[in-house]
Image (spheres, grey):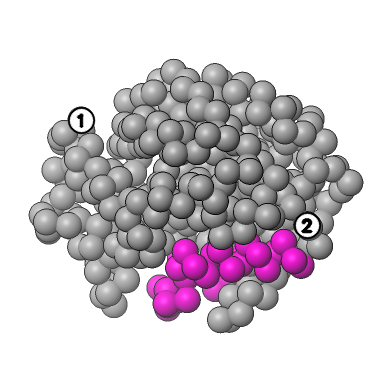
């Protein structure tokens, strides 16, 4: 979802010690007595979006947002080149979500996820279905090996000039995700790492450049964000997000008692519509809605998300 300026401020925030020297920043906004909902941001490595508060507030939710390990206001920052990534995996993030739920004394909560946050939300719900009331997943991802391959290789046929530059930045390696992970996390030269972060983020932006109203995302101009995002994405994706391929589809039976709204753009080139279709087919409790947008979303996607928030409130 696009970020918007917000006048809705959190009524509580803090830093949760989740072990491994990691502190996770969290914020609570909306109605303190409202229905709990936790937002799982994209990336991985994007950090929370303050504009999301505006969507949840009218429906009386108690919105919990947090920055996943190493990004946003969580520490140590992956934007610091000295920060190691060995204790930053999908399994660590899943444990962090549970620690946060326990810390806040929440029995069950609605899961909202966007892009990578959908993958993380599905993995969490399949491990802890008794803790999930409903799910709203926007710009659905499963982060299968074939999905990763498509995003950083296959979709290049739609953006041949930009992909040629991206491929060159990765030394034309047969697996560009592994190559960029080495440049960003396996080398020590800061200039090499900064060039790789720029090329990685330029490609991420290019994949969405055909979408209506697209302009270059200003977040990629921030060198700390750029390094955090690129290091985290390549670290997670070069390891297949530490998920068995098709794991999230195979385990959909664990979600049988959970209602869900899946909202996806028909013109999402980075995440083809077949992905949410496969998920909806394996999950009878999920309602799939396609909208005429791309990955970033827009007014139609926001309206469908608003409908789901009202229905589940």
Q: Is residue 65 visible?
A: no
277 in the magenta segment: no
Q: Is residue 97 left or right of residue 295?
A: right
* Disc nearest the viewer among 2 and 1: 2
Instruction: Kindly indicate the quadrant of the structure image that contains residue 4.
Output: top right
Residue 118, relative to residue 177: is it above or below?
above
Q: Is residue 249 above or below residue 295?
A: below
Where residue 65 appears, as percent x and y from the top left, is 67, 52
* Spot occupied by residue 206 in the image (x, y as percentages of width and height): 30, 37
Along the viewing direction, whichever of 144 and 180 lies nearer the viewer: 144
Indicate which disc residue 44 carries.
Answer: none
Residue that badge 2 annotates: 107
Q: Nearer the viewer, residue 139 or 200?
A: 139
User: Where does label 1 land, which residue?
Assistant: 158
Q: In the displayed structure, does residue 238 sit left or right of residue 77?
A: left
Q: Is residue 155 left or right of residue 36?
A: left
**Residue drawn 39% across and 23% down?**
266
Q: Which residues are magenta?
A: 74-103
Tag 2 secondary structure: loop
Q: Is residue 86 magenta?
A: yes
Point out the tag, 2 or 1, that comes first from the N-terminus: 2
Question: Could you tell me which residue is drawn at 58 percent across and 53 percent down?
Answer: 125
| Residue 111 visible here | yes
Q: Looking at the image, which residue is at 89% across and 46% down?
A: 33
Label 2–label 1 contact, CB within 8 A: no
Total count of labels: 2
* Residue that sits furthest to the bottom in the current view: 20
Seen from the viewer's position, the closer of residues 232 and 223 is 232
């Amino acid at each position: 979802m696009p970020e918007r300026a917000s006048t809705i401020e959190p009524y509580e925030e803090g830093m949760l010690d989740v072990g491994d020297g990691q502190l996770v920043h969290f914020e609570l906004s909306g109605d303190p007595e409202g229905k709990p909902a936790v937002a799982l941001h994209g990336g991985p490595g994007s950090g929370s979006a303050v504009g999301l508060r505006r969507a949840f507030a009218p429906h009386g939710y108690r919105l919990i947002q947090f920055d996943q390990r190493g990004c946003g206001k969580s520490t140590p920052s992956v934007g610091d080149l000295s920060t190691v990534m060995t204790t930053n995996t999908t399994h660590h993030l899943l444990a962090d979500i549970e620690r946060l739920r326990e810390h806040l004394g929440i029995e069950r909560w609605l899961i909202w996820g966007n892009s990578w946050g959908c993958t993380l939300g599905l993995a969490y719900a399949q491990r802890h279905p008794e803790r999930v009331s409903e799910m709203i997943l926007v710009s659905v991802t499963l982060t299968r090996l074939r999905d990763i391959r498509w995003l950083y290789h296959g979709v290049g046929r739609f953006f041949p000039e930009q992909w040629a530059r991206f491929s060159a930045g990765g030394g034309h390696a047969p697996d560009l995700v592994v190559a960029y992970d080495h440049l960003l996390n396996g080398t020590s030269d800061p200039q090499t790492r900064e060039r790789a972060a720029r090329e990685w983020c330029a490609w991420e932006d290019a994949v969405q450049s055909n979408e209506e109203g697209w302009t270059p995302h200003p977040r990629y101009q921030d060198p700390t964000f750029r390094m955090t995002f690129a290091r985290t994405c390549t670290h997670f994706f070069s390891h297949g997000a530490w998920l068995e391929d098709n794991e999230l589809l195979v385990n959909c039976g664990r979600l049988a008692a959970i209602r869900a709204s899946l909202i996806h753009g028909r013109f999402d080139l980075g995440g083809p519509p077949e992905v949410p279709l496969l998920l909806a087919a394996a999950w009878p409790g999920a309602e799939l809605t396609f909208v005429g947008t791309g990955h970033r979303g827009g007014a139609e996607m926001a309206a469908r998300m608003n409908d789901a928030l009202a229905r589940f409130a």
